[in-house]
Image (cartoon, coloured by chain):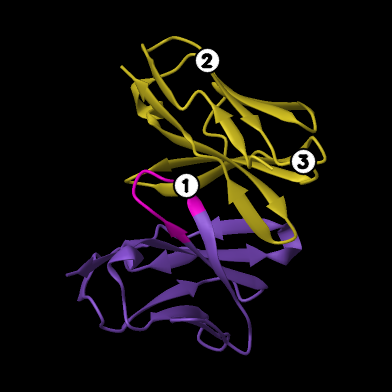
Amino acid sequence: DAGVIQSPRHEVTEMGQEVTLRCKPISGHDYLFWYRQTMMRGLELLIYFNNNVPIDDSGMPEDRFSAKMPNASFSTLKIQPSEPRDSAVYFCATQDAETQYFGPGTRLLVL
Amino acid sequence: RKEVEQDPGPFNVPEGATVAFNCTYSNSASQSFFWYRQDCRKEPKLLMSVYSSGNEDGRFTAQLNRASQYISLLIRDSKLSDSATYLCVVNQKGDDKIIFGKGTRLHILP
């Protein structure tokens, strides 16, 4: 298995633009997580899904953020409109038993 | 009190030395505990689970103290390749909540 795949790996955009981050989970893993990591705040859980259903989105910062999982092999995290404070590394992770496997992350810079 | 707290470091340790760091958690209902390792500009990866009886994997030993609500990681005979950030992870079974600490940075010096 190729592991968790995220795209793009790097994204530079201007304030106000829409940003879409993509994740392909490991096949057979029922849980999918979206995290954001910054130096100041560390790793923050934004939202997670179980069997494609959003379970807890309490970590989503505000309405500008939305996440979907239309099927077991794909998830997106969208930011619209983006702001400079959204600059961070965004990780997608999936879970097998109690182990989480992280993708390589998307480095987002909003100018 | 924060849910999961770690000393951010950095811990600067000479190669070959033994180093240990702790992680405290606030919720006594926490059920599962883990250490993850994150290299610079990489994703976190599972290092080891922490069992109630303590567990060892080569040079690494993890322990859990439920009474004082902390877990620890001990690294013996440290190698340059051990330089990384070590993240403490706590899983609260009741609400399926997984919480990551902010990590402890470790630098092994030649």
Q: Which chain is yellow?
A: A
Q: Which residue is mark 2?
A: A80
Q: Is residue B40 magenta?
A: yes
Q: In this picture, which residue range is highlighted in magenta?
A: B37-44
Query: Is residue B110 placed above or below A3 in the rendered structure?
Result: below
Instruction: Name which residue type carries label 1.
Output: Glu
Residue located beneath label 1 in the image: B43
Q: Looking at numbered disc 2 in the image, what kind of residue is underneath it?
A: Gln
In this image, A82 relative to A4: left or right?
A: left
Kind of element beneath mark 1: loop
Tell me the quarter of the picture where residue A73 sits. top right
**Residue at figure coordinates x 45%, y 9% from the top left:** A17
Quarter of the image holding residue A66?
top right
Q: Is residue A38 above or below residue A67?
A: below
For disc 3, the marked residue is A27
Which x, y percent locates residue B69?
52, 81
- Quick check: marks 1 and 2 in contact, CB under 8 Å? no
Pointer 2 with pointer 3, Cβ within 8 A: no
